[in-house]
């Protein structure tokens, strides 16, 4: 169960990094950003059907999310049944923050809610002013227009939740897959923190740039 949770988490991190890198194409301009988005839809044509790559990524991401949430719920339930009464030094003995459980649980809920909004906004364009599916650049700019500042605030809050989730989740996944190692614990925690910060900053720079007029 823990291995399945860790592997699904790693797959999601890889997707997040690729998604972040793709978002940064917005700084190259409208044509380049839209060409990148079109390339994702037409990848492999004519040998492969239209949007094959996107559907592979979507199915893989959904599967990873389902496995991750399911294993988290099962493992949490098992932990409560095995230890209904908490003891004082449980978290410190494992190198975890005393609030790690709450960060992962509530942070995960915020992230799920954000993913739903993100799909409605930038994937299906249900709540986005730009309906042209080929204008990815215009959709992003419209989303973070200063007049829609609550969307930007929600996006940034979700990124904070994602950062905390990644920081603990990456460290925990390494501990699960590679095994606990006191010697490398601090280094692993530092790497997990660095990865989380890079991802949060990489995502946050786009809405902030649009909001403050650096991208129009």
Image: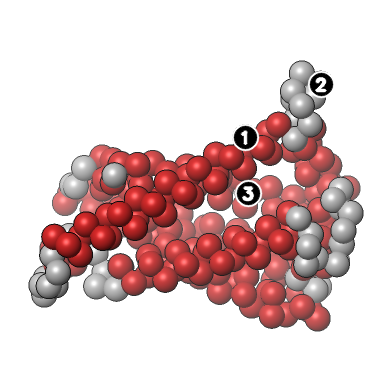
**Circle on res. 216:** none
What percent of the width, then of the height, locates residue 51?
75, 35
Mark 2 in CB contact with mark 3 (< 8 angstroms): no
**Residue linked to disc 3:** 19
Front one among 61 and 21 = 61
How packed is label 1: few (under 14 Cα within 10 Å), some, or many (20 or more)?
Answer: few
Does dot 2 land on a helix, a strand or a loop? loop
Mark 2 crowd level (few <14, some 14–19, many ≥20, 10 Å Cα): few
Rendered position, 38 above or below 108: above
Q: CA distance from mark 1 to mark 3?
A: 14 Å
Q: Is residue 200 above or below residue 53?
A: below
Q: Furthest-top residue in view?
A: 47
Under circle 3, the secondary element is helix
- In this rendering, does residue 30 appear at all? no
Q: What is the C-alpha distance between the residues marked 2 and 3? A: 24 Å
Residue under the point 71% across and 61% down? 120
Choose mark 2 or mark 3, whichever is in front: 2
Measuring from the top left, give residue 99's x and y in whole percent: 29, 73
Does residue 126 sit above or below 14 in this rendering? Answer: below
Q: Label 2, on which residue?
A: 46
> What distance separates the C-alpha of mark 2 from that of mark 1?
16 Å
Residue that mark 1 sits on: 56
Q: Nearer the viewer, residue 78 or 98?
A: 78
The quadrant of the image that shows the N terminus is: top left
Give neighbour class at mark 3: few <14, some 14-19, many 20+ (Cα, 10 Å): some
The residue sitting at 55% across, 39% down in the picture is 60
């Amino acid at each position: 169960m823990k291995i399945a949770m860790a592997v699904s988490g790693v797959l999601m991190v890889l997707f997040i990094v690729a998604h972040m890198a793709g978002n940064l194409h917005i700084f190259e301009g409208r044509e380049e950003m839209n060409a990148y988005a079109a390339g994702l839809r037409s990848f492999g044509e004519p040998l492969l059907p239209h949007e094959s790559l996107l559907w592979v990524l979507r199915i893989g991401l959904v599967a990873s999310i389902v496995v991750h949430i399911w294993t988290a719920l099962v493992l949490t339930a098992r932990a409560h049944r095995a230890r209904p009464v908490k003891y004082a030094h449980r978290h410190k003995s494992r190198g975890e923050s005393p609030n790690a459980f709450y960060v992962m649980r509530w942070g995960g809920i915020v992230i799920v809610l954000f993913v739903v909004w993100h799909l409605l906004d930038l994937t299906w364009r249900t709540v986005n002013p730009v309906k042209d599916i080929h204008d990815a650049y215009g959709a992003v700019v419209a989303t973070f227009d200063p007049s829609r500042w609550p969307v930007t605030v929600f996006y940034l809050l979700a990124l904070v939740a994602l950062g905390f989730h990644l920081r603990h989740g990456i460290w925990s996944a390494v501990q699960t897959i590679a095994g606990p190692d006191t010697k490398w614990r601090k280094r692993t925690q530092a790497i997990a923190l660095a990865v989380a910060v890079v991802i949060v900053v990489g995502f946050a720079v786009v809405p902030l740039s649009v909001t403050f007029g650096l991208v129009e």
